[in-house]
Amino acid sequence: MLVKNKFRKSTLAYDMQCIFHTNDINKYLVFGIFLSAFVAPISFAQTTAEVATQPSQSLSTPVAIELPVIDPVVAPSDPAKVSNDTDSMQLLQEQSPPNPKIQFKPIEFEDLEDLAISPVDQSMANEIYAAADEAKKEAELARKESTRIPEQVVKDSTVQEITEMTRAPVDIDQLMNSIQADSKIVVEANSAGRTLNNLVQDESEEPVKKLNFLQRIVNKVRPSKDNIVVAAKITVSVEGAPPILAENIKAKLSAFTVESFTEYSSAVPQLRALSNQAAQAVGYYNAAFKFEKVTESKVKIKVTPGNPVKVEEEEIAFFGAGANLPQFRVIGVLPDLYVGDTFNHGYYEKTKSRILEAASNNGFFDGYWLLHDVRVNQPENTADINLRYETGSRYKLGEVEFRMSDPSKPFPINLDILKTLAPWEEGADYTAWRVNGLASNLTNSRYFNYTLVDAIKPDPMVVPLELPPDIQALVDQQKITESELAGQATNKVTAVSAKEVTQTIVDEKQFAGTEVSPEAARSMRVEDTQHTEKETEAERLKILAREEKRIPVIVTLNADQLNSLETGLGYGTDTGVRLRSQYRRAIVNRYGHSFDANLEVSQIRQAIDGRYNIPYTHPLNDYISLVGGYEREDRDNVGPDMSLVIESAVLGADRIIKGARMDWQHIFGVRYRLDRVTQQGVIDNSEIPDAFVIPGARPEQESLLMGYEVSKTLADQRINPTRGFKQSYKLELGSRSLLTDTNMAIINTNWKGLYSFGENDNYQVLGGANLGYIFAEDFTSVPYNLRYFAGGDQSMRGFDYKSLSPMEYGYKVGGQALAVGTAEFNYQFKEGWRAAVFSDFGNAYDKTFSNETEYSVGVGLRWRSPIGPIRIDVASGISQEGSPIRLHFFIGSQL
């Protein structure tokens, strides 16, 4: 018979053949049992002695070792179901009838010390070895005399096999676990006389399925799921544990595979160790666990948590130049763990990370730990936390050095303008927000298509910790032990290396196919030289930074793409299909001027405008913008059987002054408008109200308005805020004596607030109001396009674009006042996805607010995209009978 033992997933592949006579197998079995009866006590006694010499920390996890004594004649019918769990073993003994030939006696780890060490008599040992030699000789003789199976010739090992066998180091634990989980024994007659190589080939080779042309293309675009192997994980249920402990145990065991769980007796110690680690991480140092295998992929854990460890004393102290820095003082006053809290390793590490982050963000690069220590006292179940940090000196920021990615190209902008983008003066204290602000300014300026801001920081300080005397003694002892082990490992490695070791020198030309040209070789040498020079410069700057206590900042720029064009296509119920396009010239000249042009085309509106931006004191925060544009709108149903075509030409200038992100923004501007109104439809002029401008009366209207606008936005995030408030106020003035048809003042106010609450901010409310009023000496002379209209995407959803207005004799004359509000509630049903219900209400009113208030309701869907919320709404103006359902689509922040 051929016995084949196959280990599929082990690092070293084993395929072994053994040929025995039936009588010889009984001899080896009796010999093995006889030998184990004498060797086992010695092995376990030696193990107990070794464990006793280890530190007490290694004994924190209870270990149970079972020594089953099995009669060689009678064996369990299903060994895989025999568990080493104490509770399962006891249940097996209670349910099974007593059998003198099978006895299972679980032995606890603590009981090993009481076992007697039985010495082996030398004469008895000699008899054992003699019997073993005799049995071996008989087996070899029987194998040679057998003629049923010819002797096999094993081929020499290949180079690859030798490499696999000599590869080191080998993870023995992983190898043994893999062998225990995946080993299969197959017994078959060797009638074909196959060798080891034949067996490997027969088992591994499978018919290769040929793919057609389309299947190969599909596999390239979307790889087959058959090639992606995902190990199944076990399911864990926890009973008797507090929520934080239960969740941590589940998280710790979430990576435990079903394959490892197959051998339950081997899996239980691993599960116990992982559960104990999870319990200690959240402060339960005395937890006990009982495991129950529910199914092949599910385990139930019954936990006795015990009393948690409480923080009894806590000291967080800072020394050095930054001891009184507000960021450090806040951590000292508001740590993540307080006295009386259950000790949590995660919170403790978070406090340490906050200290290191505060030091790095504020320029204390010479900081180091004097002491970071937690002492857990047992059985008192208390913990003492000691964190002592030396901040060292605070570093300064040097002047920014700008470089082009291609040194041969000149700067496209004067360096004086670039330097204004750095939010600090030379010699200012280092802060991370200043460096990040420079990177943000360079990106927002859109001057360059590539920017890299590199602050050269010195390497961290390495200073030995201050340790208590008893702990220091343990550390010293550990270092001595590690040194001795390292010496032994070196000797072992040297001994292995003393054997024949060869290194093959590979000719790269045989893989390249062609020889490297002189030009390519020269280019490769230049790149290597530049890379080496950069590394050398970085090391030099690090040393210089530590000596001078000053951080150099190097900015690398690239301006190869000065022109950009963006185009978008959209649809809305109000406008129909619309096309938007934007052209930008990032740098017009060396003075930092830039130019933007926008084009919008839809069924009801066509517009084009341009802005020429000139830096005043800062390219981003203080600049002048020259504006000009033209727009044309079709207004349907403004009166009985009448529509209008409204054209506007605008020319003006703005000075825009910005502060920090959450500061007030100021805009001082002047606008000249020329509006033209063209009637479509034949209407009797006598039926048109005075407030409505018609051809033949004053088809052209002009105004010159001086304006000031101030706005401020407070938000926790810029792109996808969850909490925030935005407010803006605008005033425009026009005089009849200065290119304006009538004296007027236009006031507009806009408020919008956003607030999220609940777990993971799942619930969100949004409210807003838009108010405005036109003070005019003669309202009938106010340009039609400056009057108020409501309805549309940006006003009142559910109503047509600018369809709401005061009516006179059936004509929409435009409002003198505006009051529109919105209220919305949305719920996050999936990470990044929200469902919303909302209502908009208000109207464009006449002078006395006599016309009715309209309102609409709707539902929507929000998706938190990287470029901001994408919103899709459907709404209907329910205050008007027969109002259709309208679709609205938005991209951008809700504030």
Image (cartoon, rainbow, N blue to C red):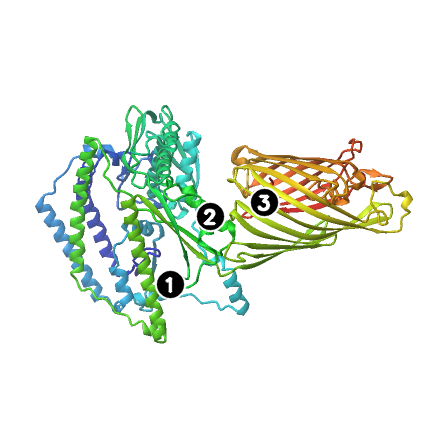
- Which sits earlier in the primary sequence, circle 3 or circle 1? 1
Relative to residue 57, is residue 566 depicted above or below? Answer: below
Q: Position of residue 470 (x, y in %)?
A: 19, 31
Amino acid type indicated by mark 1? Glu
- Of mark 2 and mark 1, the one earlier in the sequence is 1
- Where is 604 relative to 805, above or below? below
Query: What is the quadrant of the N terminus in the image?
Result: bottom left
Tell me, for residue 203, which label it has, or none: 1
Along the viewing direction, whichever of 803 and 607 lies nearer the viewer? 607
For marks 2 and 3, give the CA distance: 18 Å
Task: State which tag comes first along the sequence, 2 or 3.
Answer: 2
Asked which secondary structure carries label 2, the reply is loop
| Mark 2 → mark 1, Cα distance in angstroms | 68 Å
Amino acid at dot 2: Leu
Q: Which residue is mark 2?
A: 421
Q: Which mark is residue 655?
A: 3
User: Mark 2 near mark 3, Cβ–Cβ under 8 Å?
Assistant: no
